[in-house]
Image (cartoon, helix red, strand yellow):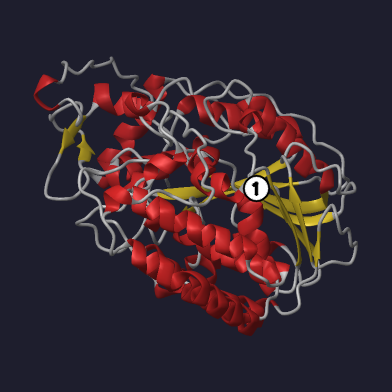
Amino acid sequence: MSDRYFQSRYRAHKYWGRRPWYAVRALIERHSAPGEVVLDSFCGSGTTLVEALATGRRAVGVDLNPMAEFITRVTVTPADTRALERAFTRLRDRVEGDIHALYAQDPDTITPRHWYPTDVLPVSRFGVMLKDAGMTVADLFSPRNLAATALLWDAIQCLECGPTTRDLLRFSFTAALAQFTKMIRTKKDGTGWWVNAYRIPRSYRENNVWHSFENKLRVVVRMKEETNALLGPVSIATPDAPDPDASCTLRLGSATDLSFLPDESVDYIFIDPPWAIKYFDLSVLWCAWMGFSLEFDREIFPWQEEFRQDMERSLRECARVLRPGRTLTLNFATRYTGVLNEWRDAVEATGLDWIGIEPLQQDQLSFVQRQHETALKGNYLLHLRKHATGQAVAPVETPPPVTAEEMERMVRALLEERGPLTYDDIFQALYPALARRHLACDLYSVLLYGFGYHNGDSEEGLWSLEEGNADPRLSHTAPPRLRRSHDTAEPCLPFD
């Protein structure tokens, strides 16, 4: 793994779905010039904004998740690290002894003496399981650690310090918060939140709240020292403090409404909409302590009825604010046919020119990418351009959908040329050439019923033309493979 992946500014606070900062920076430098405006209307924890500011651009960020807006704002805001150190010393004098004393007491006798949140955790793939319905944020903590966490939070809220320093203390608190919970496995190396959901393992570790917070604050100090030097005196415009000359504009809101931006005022757009992670569900732990409200009914996420309409509205807003002749890059990583078709329709509706697709490889795979063979191991960058006249281009005639038979011919030709391949290798070879066409089939289903699967000696199984288990998930109970009669036409290889 590349050492450059781990920069202090991206190690301080966990956030899901971060893209490699150096890849985002390279895109910004390729498609814009210093002094120009870069927009990310799904800005998440702010990678695009940080790298735009670091390269002398002006940055505009929008996100509906208040925790994303908070992380981004704290990251880019200049701060006096000496003031933070002094505030930390006063905080330590106030609560360290009381917190340590809790670990010398009988845990059965401890009850929290300060406020703590009781928000109910969502039941979902990214929340709690159905059997745990009704579980609250407080239930994630042992009684002792809940008391210690509540004490620490109350002290941070009451400490005499400036607003920027308090935000850094709150940032350190939420960054360490998962380590205070029962979600940390006893046998796990490190102290991270190990799965994209709220799960309490059979055997968990009760970390000392003060030690975890102090360790995280040291990381935050290094982060702020780095961003102070890298970004310089960033000025931030907000709805409460508008500033047309600010180097950074930050908005808490939906990507479907960029009305605060004039037409044709942005020089480059990079967006990374949610494709596999439901950020709101995973943010409940943080937001509950911070007192942030999450507008779940407005979150844009695949599998929701409004996904296609929301994506179209978001992309239309991007097209409106983009200057003529300039580029929009859309990052995506999904293999599901329905979602791919929906976002393709949304892109077509903007009237932007399709320029091309390129892969974006991840130095660090996510938990899902590591655990599931059919999860894509890389992302894709779709480049679109606004017509130089500023007018939408006339839509071209829609090509016919890709059928299962056509997909099978393509896979067969690919395997004949290259030999056995993983699912990810096959998807990467085929998909870029098919991006503009509707898919009437699913690649996994085509592989399942037309090709053999072998575990081999590699971590991932290989699909081949030879006989083998048709479904890696079904092992000995795999159904007979359904062979189709093959068209004798010479297939067109999209992977040349």
Q: How far from the left and from the top, in percent, is residue 9?
A: 54, 70
Q: How far from the left and from the top, in percent, is residue 26?
A: 60, 67
Q: How far from the left and from the top, in percent, is residue 152?
A: 50, 62
Residue drawn at 41 percent across, 51 percent down: 146
User: Foreground residue, 213 or 243?
Assistant: 213
Name the side, left or right, on which 137 lies relative to 39: left
Residue 24 in sight in this render: no
* Quarter of the figure with residue 489: top left
User: Foreground residue, 444 or 163?
Assistant: 163
Name the side, left or right, on which 446 lies relative to 17: left
Check disc 1: other Cα within 10 Å, few if <14, some if 14-19, many if 20+.
many
Residue drawn at 52 percent across, 72 percent down: 94
Name the side, left or right, on which 4 lies relative to 323: left
Q: Which amino acid lies under the numbered mark 1 shown in the image of this protein?
A: Pro
* Quarter of the figure with residue 34: bottom right
Name the residue beneath numbered marker 1. Answer: 66
Up-down relation of residue 413 to residue 448 (above or below): below
Q: Residue furthest left?
A: 476
Residue 191 in sight in this render: yes
Up-down relation of residue 277 to residue 74 (above or below): above
Q: Secondary structure at mark 1?
A: helix
* Quarter of the figure with residue 258: top right
Q: How far from the left and from the top, in percent, is residue 463?
A: 23, 37
User: Foreground residue, 308 or 71?
Assistant: 71
Q: How many marks?
A: 1
User: Foreground residue, 371 or 94?
Assistant: 94
Up-down relation of residue 440 to residue 107 (above or below): above
| Quarter of the image that includes the N terminus | bottom left
